[in-house]
Image (cartoon, rainbow, N blue to C red):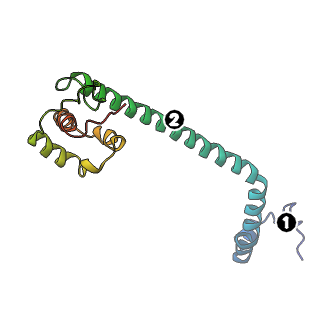
């Protein structure tokens, strides 16, 4: 036994004792894990709340961005269709044919150029429903849109409204 008293924390005032490999090993293998466990137990509710806030913020941001992208895309498609319907190539495209009780609608003759453009731009076009066609129109350029309009008017003449 030594004449020196131990300190309150169980260590000694002797700096040489703190360099003891056995003491450092005990600190690292016993006291450090216990300290980490105690800190985690005390801080866990705060860490959970912090993590939840972070994830909820990211989800809210993703929802806002998603709504923005969908709204913008809907506007672009609507604008493109309106332009196509009102300015692109002679009037009505994908509109219901105007029928009188006595006459059938007059459809333009098939356009082989338009047919080739449509076949190239929209694979399996003739098997697609009107809603499927409309979804794919956004990826087309103005010339392709006019070709789709001409082809549709000369074939099925479906409505997009």
Label disc, if present, on residue 10 of the rendered structure: 1
For mark 2, what is the residue? 64
Q: Earlier in the sequence, mark 1 or mark 2?
A: 1
Q: Is residue 104 left or right of residue 65?
A: left
The percent coordinates of residue 94 (x first, y second) are 28, 32
The percent coordinates of residue 40 (x first, y second) are 74, 58
Q: Secondary structure at mark 2?
A: helix
The percent coordinates of residue 142 (x first, y second) are 19, 32
Q: Nearer the viewer, residue 21 or 73?
A: 73
Q: Which residue sits at x=73%, y=48%?
A: 46
Q: Which residue sits at x=86%, y=62%?
A: 7
Q: Residue furthest left?
A: 112
Q: Residues within 10 Å of mark 1 (few under 14, many from 20)?
A: few
Q: Is residue 117 above or below residue 88?
A: below
Q: Secondary structure at mark 1?
A: loop
Q: Which residue sits at x=20%, y=38%?
A: 148
Q: Is residue 70 left or right of residue 78?
A: right
């Amino acid at each position: 036994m030594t004449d020196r008293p131990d300190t309150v924390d169980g260590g000694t005032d002797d700096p040489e004792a703190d360099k003891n490999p056995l003491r450092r090993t005990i600190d690292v293998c016993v006291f450090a894990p216990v300290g980490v466990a105690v800190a985690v137990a005390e801080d866990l509710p705060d860490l959970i709340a912090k993590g939840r806030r972070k994830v909820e913020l990211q989800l809210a941001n993703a929802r806002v961005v998603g709504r923005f992208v969908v709204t913008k895309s809907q506007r672009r498609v609507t604008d493109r269709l309106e332009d196509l319907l009102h300015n692109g190539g002679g009037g009505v495209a994908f509109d219901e044919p105007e029928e009188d009780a006595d006459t059938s609608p007059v459809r333009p003759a098939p356009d082989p150029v338009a047919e080739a453009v449509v076949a190239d731009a929209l694979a399996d076009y003739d098997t697609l429903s009107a809603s499927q066609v409309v979804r794919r129109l956004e990826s087309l350029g103005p010339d392709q849109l006019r070709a789709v309009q001409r082809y549709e008017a000369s074939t099925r003449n479906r409505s997009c409204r």
